[in-house]
Amino acid sequence: MIRERLIGYIEQSIIQNWDIEALSNYKEKGYSYKEIAAKILKFHLFYKDIGIKEGDKIALVGRNSAYWCVVYLATVTYGAVIVPILPDFKPEDLSNLINHSDARFLFVDDKIYETLDIAKLPEITGVISLEDFSMITSGNTLMKEAYSALEEKYAKAYPNLNQEDIKFSDIPNDKLAVISYTGGTTGFSKGVMITHNSLAANVRFAQTHMPLKPGDPLVSFLPLAHTYGCAFEFLFPFTFGCHITILSKTPSPQIIVQAFKEIKPRLILSVPLVIEKIFKKQLLPVIRKPAMKVLLAIPGINTILHKKIKGTLTETFGGRFHEIVIGGAPFNAEAERFFRKIGFRFSVGYGMTECGPLISYTSWDTTRLGASGKAVDTLEVTIDSPDPEKQIGEIILRGENVMLGYYKNENATREMIDEKGWMHTGDLGVIDKEGNIFIKGRSKVMILGSSGKNIFPEEIEAVINNMNYIAESLVILEDNKLIGLIFPDYEMVKKDNISEERLLAILEETRKKINEKIPEFMAVSKYRIHPEEFAKTPKRSIKRFLYTK
């Protein structure tokens, strides 16, 4: 166990940043650290009144918002267990997850609550709205009365709230803090049990390696119910006294870019999808023009052009960021090479929900091309192969960040964590002499080709997805041949008035061009149009198991 505590970080930040704005929804008035502290203490009083104990579970289902963050902070600092569930799940799945978690109380968006059958949630004793903190339903009169009297009780307990009042739970680091339900592309959702120790280790590393200071603005647009967004767009900056602006509705890349330009964040966390869309829509059409290709090949001129492109791209993200940290999925190799060439400030990290989430990271100016950083200081990471530097094997790890296991699923836990404490990630890769981790794919996704060579479909898909008229792709194996399922970019098809016959011809030309660029054993035999967007998990990963036989 590490010495630092997440609750200690939160207490310290509130005390030191008392009057600084802490959380606000986009284009709305925010709340200071003092105001957040008041809301936390009110819920502590309420939890105590209704018999919530340390270790009890509180479910949280809703879109990103300042109130979502308040509930998370209030629950964790009380010593109860927060169960944040992505709102994208279907009503039946939400009910199943809430019941599976053994949650006693529920905070939920009004619209989501309307889809739930409260009779199917027998353990839930009360429900509070995330819209305005009004009580939607309560299991008994005493609970309703306790909530009605909360303001009066708070006023008596804290007549003049000040920093000396900020002392929360002393719950030890080895105790459970979060149950995170994550949908995987190859299976069903599991409840990942994350300790206070894991969260503290993530925050400590970020504080040491990602430079911020009190008052720095950040934009939060990743799903807060997922550990990546929660740890690095919320918990870590909150412990630094930053002002976090939350994009409460599911934001499009256009809205995200608009917010960046207005708020000018000092640190940006992103998934590859946002960066790659900007690269594909704004940069590729320019740098692939024949005249531009010639100019970019001329020494001196290419330096000037790279500088101009870098400046424009930097302004797109607000112009004041230290770096952009990309994680959550593999980053497109062509985009990464170009961004490195122009000196754009970005870094690619690696993590899993099971580690709360961080596994590896290095800053933008020290990271290696194609790598996902080096292992964080609280983890031991290695490759399960005879030669970890050259022979691809499964990435395994152990240390402070690792989960307790899967809630009420000992079999799945044993499959993930072996008797020596090594957690088997399911990801494949190599590690160089300096400790840089290079991820090659997922073991459950890897295809064994007819030649006996390992094929990682994500590598092929990354190339395909950069081509015109293609929105996304999925490479599968049928009859020992690689097939590319293509969901066309119908917006671009319509704009250019491309007929179905012409589209098929373009896709065939694209297939041949790509096959010339990749090893023969990775060549795709044919493309087949998939008429609709691929089904995805709440984390926006394609559910591959639905498309493979």
Image: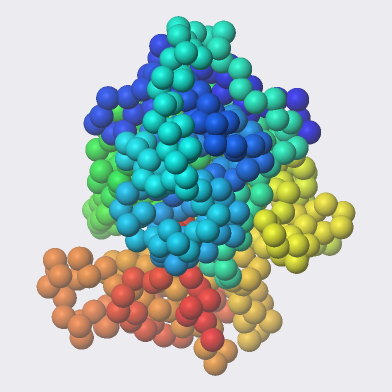
Q: Position of residue 402 (x, y in %)?
A: 72, 46
Which quarter of the figure is the N terminus placed in? top right
Asked whether, in this view, residue 65 is left or right of residue 398, the answer is: left
Q: Examine the rendered structure and indicate whether residue 361 appears above or below residue 465.
A: above
Asked whether residue 256 is in view, the answer is yes
Residue 442 image offset from top left, x and y in percent: 62, 65
The answer to whether residue 44 is left or right of residue 244 is: right
Residue 345, image x and y in percent?
Answer: 45, 35
Against 62, is 47 above or below?
above
Q: Residue furthest front?
A: 141
Q: Quadrant of residue 488?
A: bottom left
- The residue positioned 30% from the left and 53% from the top of the image is 111
Which of the pair 123/408 is nearer the observer? 123
Q: Which quadrant does the C terminus fall into?
A: bottom right
What residue occupies the far right of the structure in this picture? 420
Residue at left offset 41%, top offset 70% = 535
Residue at left 53%, top 71%?
457
Q: Nearer the viewer, residue 531 or 276?
A: 531
Front-most of 183 and 328?
183
